Every structure is written in structure tokens, then in C-alpha cells.
Amino acid sequence: MLNAKVKYFFIAPTIVILAIIVLYPFFYGIFASFHHYERFSLDRFIGVDNYSMIFHSSRMWNSLIVTLTFTLSSVGISFAVGFAISIFIERIFANTKFAKYIIAGILFPMVMTPVVVGILWKIMFWQTYGPVNYYLASMGLPAKAWLTLGSTALPATIFVDIWEWTPFMTLVLYAGLMAVPREPVEAAMVDGASYLQTLRYIIIPFLKPIIVIALIIRFVEAFRWFDTIFVMTGGGPGINTETLSFYAYKVAFSHLHFGKAMAITTIMFFFTLIGSLIFVEFSGLSWEK
Amino acid sequence: MFLEKFVNRVILVGICVILTFSLFGSGATPEKPGVTPETPGEKGLEAGPPESFKGTEIHLAIIGAPGIPQALKHLDDFEARTGIKVTYDMLPELTLREKTTMDLALGTGIYDGIMFGLMYVVPYAEPGWLLPLDAFIESKATESEELGMSDYISKFLEANTFEGKLYGLPFYGETSVFAYRKDLFNQYNLKPPKTLEDVRYAAQKLTQKEEDFYGITLRGKRGGGMNVYTWTGWLWAFGGRFFNEKMEPVLDSPEAIKSLEEYASILHEYGPPGSAGFEWTETKTWLQEGKAAMTLDASPFVTLLEDTKESKTAGKWGYISPSDIIIQETGKNLEPTLYTWSFGISTFSRHPWATWKFLSWICSKKLAHTLANEGFLFRGAPTRKSMLEITEEPWWTESVLEAAENARIDFRPRISVWREVGDRIGIAVEQAIAGIKPAKTALTEANKDVYDIMKRAGYYE
């Protein structure tokens, strides 16, 4: 019985710190979202007023659509590309000494600070002197002001996010591929299965838990996406690239409506929660041991 | 096993209790600010200025506006003469705003004196967060022959007034100028523009897209202090305005729509690609690099364009007060902008008199002249008439003075929810420039949202 007490003693600091730095702000945010909280003073309970105000604002719906478009296309494409690259590396280089150098090289975009990524791509897309337009022009294609055109701003920022996060997908899926046991794959090959068939019926089922985890992490990450957009477009042109996080930031620190901002972030939380649960549910995995 | 379960429960309940209490703790309403006899500032005020300031310490929140670093080099003299010890936090704009707003709203009185921009005069003065300065000016704590109130360009003082009382002493004052490339105008036989039609004609003549050279560049990026700051000049000129007498937004009026259509179309046809994303930094770069021929922007642009180290086009510019460019349709002129950085005294200051002493020194005519004689001329952003006489660059000073004297105080509405309103209007302006929405749709939508914002802020019954 002594053991039981001792173990609580040892985990207590963790629980306390977690409560202070994670749970407290979280619950406080939800608490504040039901209050009139402006210009740094939280004064009265107003029920769901903040929420109804948000849902009646067209800017909120715009942000939601931008966020969903961004999240789904970015996660989808970076997964597809990342999976393809990881298979390519695994097939060609897995047993060579090059593999680790290739992986290290691929990681480069991911280890960069998001703000630096933003600045870098802002320069790349710069209308007059930017490399993107330079190469397009040299190929005889029309140059564009990528980040300030309504039609190209969001795709351009999605592209940057894919560029930044495909390495993460590659890394995780490559690790998964390396862990797939050889025997069943070889047995299938001997029985005359093509590579696509082994991929479909053996490798992917093995990889499923890893794929789900990678997708959840990417989904959560993309859904609250803020930093590169802040640097690259500032939500513009107009509100074409204004995501939920950016909108919440504006409402809080520009308009000083903290209660309303907390309501937006609370809604975001439930969206991510539901999104993650959907991934888990549809993965068909058993999460109990 | 029982003990284990019991301990589990105790821990769980403990965490719940701690969290609940902490929620209540921080959820407690901070004291509403306001002038009460108990506030330290008020007590000190009634007592009148002390005989000696020796040993008094004051703390300020300031921004590194042009002239501030130069003025602070003289701080030692001030401290030695008065015995007041001055400490300050020099902060970037956003942080300054957050910190001072928090300090004032909570009434903590960390800062005795603060610097604030023009758009914050009303939001800070209305709830009683700042002390009116009129009584101070008359007092013996003022070094009156140094302060020189009558030397101020009057518009800058008016702009810092709320309900008849002065709340800020301007240190930095900005208006706008229309700048054009004199050399190119001569080369193409163009006359300095007198109407907006002239501007459009010149822009058309000078634009050479193959050469990557454009007739005009203006701010396009969204923001109450960004594209709205320059577009407002157009808005007034076309006979539009932000609000009617009932403070209902009238941005969907034909005049307002026309003004945005003009602003967007001149940029669309004769402006650089991607103008919708231009902040003043981009505008500046295009002009300095000799890639654009005209602009209408804040008066400190003079300094930037004439800077021989940075600007390839230094010495090639002519300047006109926007008030000299009229719209033929309406007979009205482009409206010059108005902006100040001012010093004010916090209601919660424990040393209002010492703070005033400092204010009347740093904003004084005497110090301004000292700085001017040292070579710092507040170029493009002078608050005083006499500073314009000292400078040896008459070709722009006249335009700047004229613009400042013709500017309107309510150039942008000085309302407490301006941040939100300005942000929303900025979106509409950017949408029109980027061609996402026609000016009419963009402004009609913005008008509806601005109405909601104003309604929530309690402007209507």
C-alpha cells in the first residue's frame, strides 16, 4: 500500500503544473466566453451572447470556410505527397547509406521557424522581384501578384503549408514503412501479388495506426494555423485568407473583445475535437489493448 | 485497493476545488476606473504643485517616434535641473497600446505619463483615464516661456481636445502631402496637378508597364491606420463621410462608393501590381527606387524620399498640399490627414505635477528649437510653426504647413470603437483594390457590419 501513496507523491507536481498551465487557461477561456469581457475587464455574465454574435457574423463563416478549405486541402495533399515520397525512399534507398541523408535533407522546411517560412515565401511570391515570378516570366508565363490576388492568395498559402509539413508526413510514414514486418510482404510476393496489391492489402493495414496519428496531428496543426499567414498575407486580400485563429487574434488584440475571441477559440476547440474523433472513428482501429 | 481509490478521489476533488477557486479568483471584476477622491493622482492635484520636485520618481510609457530618441539625450539636464528622476519603457506601437490600455483600465498607475496616438484621445479621455491639462498649463509648474502654447499648429492641439479640455501635448504631428516627380513632369510637359483629373492624366502618361514603372502608388493593405488613412482623403473629397448626425454609418452612399471606385481604379490602372498588399513601407520602397511617380501619403515621407542615402530619387520631388488638389465634380479638395503622438498624464499617477513638469519640458518650444539647431528638424512632422521657419528646406515646408492647417480633426472619426470600425472598412477598401468585390458591394457589406459594431457599442437606442 505504501507504493500507491508514493506514486501519487511523485506524480503530484506534474498534475499541479499541468493544471496551472493547461487546464486553468483552458477552462478560464470557456468561462470568459460566456462573459462580457472587453478592454481587459471581465464584468458580467451574458450567457451565449458572444456565441450568437459570432454566428451572426459573415466574417466568422468566411473564416470557417477558409480554415476548412485550408485544412482539408493541406492535410490531404501533404499526406498524399508525403506518402509517395516515403514509399519512394523506402523502395529505392532503404538499405543504402543515402537514406539518412535524404531524410535529413527533406526535414529542412519542417525545422524552420514558421515566421521565417512566412518571410521566405513572402519574398518568393513578391510580385516584382520574387523568384517565383522571375522563373515564370523566363518560361513565358504571366507573372502574378500571388499573395494579393483574391484567386491565388489562399492557394499560395496552402502551397506553403504543404511545403512546410510534407516532410513531417514523409518522416512519420517512412518510419512506419520501415517497421512493417518483411515476412508477410515477402510471402505475398512469392504468391504472385503485385506491389500495389501488397501495398493495398498488407502495408497500409499495418500502417493504419501511424497514418491516423499523423493525420490527427496534421489536422490539429493546420486547423489552428496562424503564423505563416500573419506574416505572408495578414488575412488579406480583404478576408480571403483569414482563418479562425487569425480572426480570433484580430477580435482579441485589435478590437479588444476578449470574450468574443474566447468564444471563437472555444468553437475551434470543439471543431478540432470532433475532427479528431472522426478520424479515430473512421480509422476502424481498436484503441483498447 | 480501497485506499488507492480513496486517494484517487481525494486528488480529483482537490484539483476541482483548486480550479474552481482559481476561476472565481480571476473572474473577479477589477475595480472600474474613474476619478475618485481616493485616487492618488487626485490628492496630489488638489495640493497644488510642490515647492521642490527633488527625489520624485516618474515612470513613462513612450514610443520611439521621430524626435523622441534625440530629445531623451537631453534628459540628464532636465533631471539635474528639477531633481525629478525619469524612468521609461520605450515600446513598439502595439505593445505600447496594450500596456497603457491595461494600466489605465485597471487603474494600476504604473505609468505616470503615457504617449498615445491621435485615435486614442477619446478612448482614453472619455472614461476619465487621463487628466485634463488646462489647469496644469496655467500653474506655476509650467515653464511657460519654454512651453509656447501659441506656437503650436492649432489643429494638432484641437485634435487632442475632448469636450473642450486638452488631454495631450503633441510631440509629433503628421499630416499628408502629395508628392510627384518634378523631373518627369518637366520631361513630359506636365503641370503640377490641380485636380484629381490632372493626377489621373499624369498617371496615365507616366505609366510604362513594360518598363515596370507606374504612375502612382498608394496604400492598399487593410487597416484603420493603413489604407483607410489614405483613402479617407478621397472619401471626403467626393462628398462622402463615415457617419451621419445620428452616428449611423453612411459608407454605402453614392459619394463614398464613387470615392472608393476612383481610389481602386487609379491603382488598378496605373499602380504597381499587388497594390492591394501595399503598406506604407512598400509604397516608400517603390518611390525611393524610382519605380513610381506620384503618391499621397503621410508628411514624414518627405524625409524618406529626400534621404540621399536610401532614396535613389532624392532631390527629384515636388510637394503639394492635398488641399490644393480638387475634384471637379464636387469642387471639394483631397482631405489632408492628421495624426499626432502626444504625452498625457494618467489619472492614476501618484506624481501628476512632476509628470506635468516633464511634459512641459519635453514638448516645449525651447527643446524643439534646441533639437532643430542640433540638426534634427522633425522633418515632415513638426508640431510647431516656428520649427518650419528654422528649416532651410522651404520647398516642402509650405505644403506641410498648409496641409496641417487645412486638415480636419475628425478626419477619421475619433470614436472609442475605431479600431474595430477601421479594421472593417479597411477590409472593404482592400477588397475593392484587389478586385475581389466591386466597391459598391464591399462598402455596403462594411456599412452593415459597422452599424452592428456601433449598435453593440451603445450608440443607438
Image (cartoon, coloured by chain):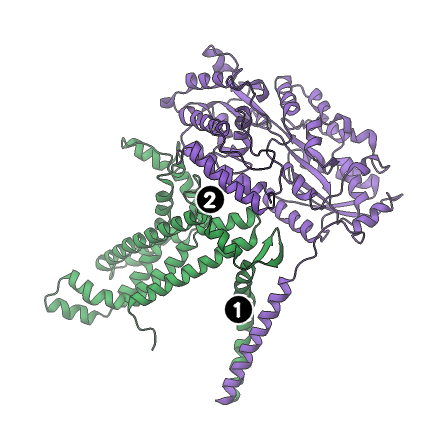
Chain colours: A green, B purple
Extreme residue toward the right, this view? B51
Question: Where is mark 2, residue-wise?
Answer: A231
Q: Residues within 10 Å of mark 2 (few under 14, many from 20)?
A: some
Image location of residue B36, percent across then percent down: 78, 51
Q: What kind of residue is marked 1?
A: Leu
Q: What kind of residue is marked 2?
A: Val
Of the pair B49 and A41, the residue shown nearer to us: A41
Q: For this view, does B438 lie left or right of residue B5? A: left
Of the pair B110 and A89, the residue shown nearer to us: B110
Find residue A161 and name its label. Answer: none
Residue located 46% across and 52% down the image: A55
Image location of residue A113, percent across then percent down: 45, 51
Question: Where is mark 1, residue-wise?
Answer: A18
First in residue order: circle 2 vs circle 1:
1
Whether B134 is drawn above or below A289: the answer is: above
Of the pair B209 and A256, the residue shown nearer to us: A256
Q: Label 1 lies in what chain?
A: A
Image location of residue B318, percent across then percent down: 55, 18
Q: Of helix, strand and loop, which one carries label 2?
A: helix
Q: For this view, does B40 lie left or right of residue B199? A: right
Residue located 30% across and 63% down the image: A211
Tell whether label 1 touches label 2 (CB within 8 Å).
Answer: no
Q: Residues within 10 Å of mark 1 (few under 14, many from 20)?
A: few
Q: Of helix, strand and loop, which one carries label 1?
A: helix
Distance of label 2 from label 1 (alpha carbons): 31 Å
The image quarter in which residue A9 lies: bottom right
